[in-house]
Amino acid sequence: MTRLRIPRVVPKPKDFSKLPWTEEFRDKFPTRRVAENAQNIAFEDLRDYLFAEKHVDYRKAKLLTDALKSEKGIVRNDNEILLTVNFPFCEWRCMNCKRNMYQKEKCSDAYMYYFDAIMREIELTREIIKKKCFIVKAICFTGNILALDEPEMEKVLSACTYSLSEMSIELGSPRLVTRSKLEILKKYNVTRIIVNALTYNTVTLRKLCRRYEFKDIYEYYKLIAEYGFDLSVELTMGLLGERELQLKRNIELAIELGANCIDLYSRCCPYDNSLEPLTNPQEISKIRKTLEFANEKMAELGFNPYFLYCTEVENGCFESVGYALGNHKCRFMEDRRMEISTVIGCGSDTQTVLVKNLHNTRKYLKNTYDMGQYVLGIDEILDKKRKFFE
């Protein structure tokens, strides 16, 4: 009996040189382009429509559809606002960081003046919120509020308590975590900790000048998990040459630590907008391959996209995506990344953005970048803020 010899078919590697969105949906917020251009398409048919009729890559069509599904639940209410309060302290400064951060122990004299100044701005902000009948949708303490002493933490948190608001803190260094400070967070109804991890890869951490390894911070995450906070972990795809293997490990470690939200940013830290755009076609293809891997991995793990925006739109169109398990999405990050609501910033290196959705307008007011200048100019800063909201 003669056996048929069937030639082995070797699948061709996917071509990542083509723009997966197509020109029609090349935008900072591609979901908005989809909503504008597919109003007459039934939602359950949208993915197939984007793929078959608009020639969008099938995986990207699914990502767009899933992200748009989450966006449809967002209410654009000009009375709802976000509040950010910045304490610019850290243990060390990352090599790629463009934020103005300080080591608290090296500026102890200026620190007390800064604390007094920001408390004055917080109090003025309360007056503005009351006068304008704003509803605080979400609050985030950026920088490291855990760098403060415990009585100061309590003073700040009690001054920033608003009913019905989601309260989050950003955490740059897990080694600032203590049991007593976590208990204070619980006391004032902080619900989420947002860890700006970037990566857990030891080699990359050393290049970034972050002086720890994963094993050094594991115990701090275990302590956080005891208190039942929602945990968001921010990771960067393609950071300093990292590819699929490192990204897979980063995602798995974040889940092991208890993350129910994983925000994946393309190429750079979400607080750094100064990275030179990629123009090399081979490098662009590598990043697109990493992004596709990330989307498939998150879907495999049961995470759904809840925000989506693109960077380097002209050259590469690289997406940054927030993923959440179930209903655990971070309201602050969703609103902030999609630029939906008015944001009031308190502290140095913050920005206030007055948003009018009906008129599609935005008005900006920046606080000074430097902590010393913020302290010395606090009277002028408060006066500008009053007039800004008048």
Image (cartoon, rainbow, N blue to C red):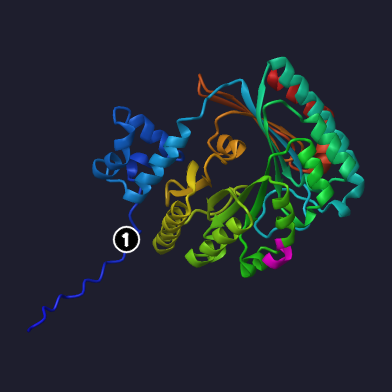
In the image, is residue 54 above or below residue 163? Answer: below
Answer left or right for 207 relative to 37.
Answer: right
In the image, is residue 19 above or below residue 7? Answer: above
Q: Quadrant of residue 342?
A: top right
Which residue type carries mark 1? Answer: Asp
Look at 81% across and 26% down and name the residue there: 123
Look at 81% across and 52% down and name the residue there: 178
Look at 45% across and 59% down and name the residue there: 290
Q: Can you give x and y, in whole percent of width and height, for residue 130 in the image? A: 73, 18
Return the residue at label 1.
15
Q: Can you give x and y, in whole percent of width and height, for residue 214 in the image? A: 67, 65
Q: How many marks?
A: 1
Residue 17 visible? The answer is yes
- Give the SS element for disc 1: loop
In magenta segment, residue 265: no
- Single out the residue that lies furthest toward the bottom: 1
Region in magenta: 210-218
Q: Quick one: 174 or 314, which is closer to the camera?
A: 174
Q: Quadrant of residue 134?
A: top right
